[in-house]
Image: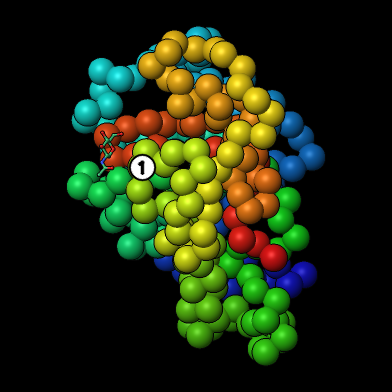
Amino acid sequence: MRTSLFYVSLATCALFSEAFSLLKREEGNQGKLSPADRQQDPIMNTPLPGFGGGKQDSSADAGNLIISDVIGKDRVINIFAGFTRDIDTISKRLDDDTQNTTVLAPLNSEIQKLPRKPWEDPKDYRSFGESAYDGSDGEDRAHRNLRRFVESHVIPSSPWKEGEKTKSLGGEELWWENKQGTRTVGPSTWSQYRHIANAAQIQPGNIEVSSIADKVSNGEVWVLKGVVNYA
Ligand SMILES: *[C@@H]1O[C@H](CO)[C@@H](O)[C@H](O)[C@H]1NC(C)=O
């Protein structure tokens, strides 16, 4: 009830329109299996370059493409991609070829199964009640919360090496490690990514990295089977 009222009040807000319409569309599809759901396994869906079967190795284009060109094209993370476009500072950053970024994009399915929406905060409901996100103050609160969620998934550097502790734009210190030993697959030029293909996990939290969706001139888009810093 709370959620549907929230949608009604915010659906008209241009700021969120894109992300909301995506979420609503995805929710509308629940119960029947959409083509996107059927392809939900991102390891099968977006193999790493050189691993065969899916996308072609785009290294010829990598010099020209930047994250903002590619992040919206991966269906399995298009909810998060919509969020990044709603946050000005982030969309500018992903559109800037002078700043490198590692985007940690949760799968649509991970965002959909959260017990509350990324722009909701239990503290707001405690302070402001059911109408916490109504009106322009409510929209501001929702936007702040969404910004925090997105910033927690943006590492302001790339490449990001195994074990390298670094702060997300949200301020959390994160690193990644390979939990299960290395399986040798792919060409040797992708040695750094063999780990990720196997069992990379973002720490803290053991958040599994399912694939690298994109590797372009100003950074990389990683696909996560989970979300960062969501208590
Ligand atoms: C930015 O990313 C590119 C592509 O991976 C890399 O060649 C370059 O060294 C990176 N720059 C910095 C400052 O990390």
State whether label 1 is within 8 Å of ligand 1.
yes
Where residue 79 sits: x, y (%)?
A: 54, 48
For label 1, the residue is: 158
In which quadrant of this rendering is ligand 1 seen?
A: top left
Which element carries disc 1, helix, strand or loop? loop
72 or 194: which is nearer to us? Answer: 194
Which of the 4 image quadrants contains residue 218? top left
Where residue 172 sits: x, y (%)?
A: 52, 62
Q: Quadrant of the N terminus?
A: bottom right
127 or 189: which is nearer to us? Answer: 189
Where residue 100 sits: x, y (%)?
A: 30, 46
> Does residue 39 appear left or right of residue 69 in this picture?
right
Q: Looking at the picture, does residue 212 appear above or below residue 55?
A: below
54 or 132: which is nearer to us? Answer: 54
Which of the 4 image quadrants contains residue 120? bottom right
> Does residue 31 appear left or right of residue 109 in this picture?
right
Q: Quadrant of the C terminus?
A: bottom right
180 or 121: which is nearer to us? Answer: 180
Q: Looking at the picture, does residue 1 appear above or below residue 24?
A: below
Q: Mark 1: few, some, or many residues within 10 Å (few <14, many ≥20)?
A: some
> Does residue 225 appear left or right of residue 95 in this picture?
right
**Which residue is located at x 46 percent, y 46 percent?**
164
Q: Is residue 8 visible?
A: no
**Which residue is located at x 54 percent, y 71 percent?**
145
Q: Looking at the picture, does residue 229 appear above or below residue 219?
A: below
Q: Which amino acid is tagged 1?
A: Ser
Farthest bottom residue? 127
**Which residue is located at x 48 percent, y 83 percent?**
136
Where residue 56 sits: x, y (%)?
A: 40, 14
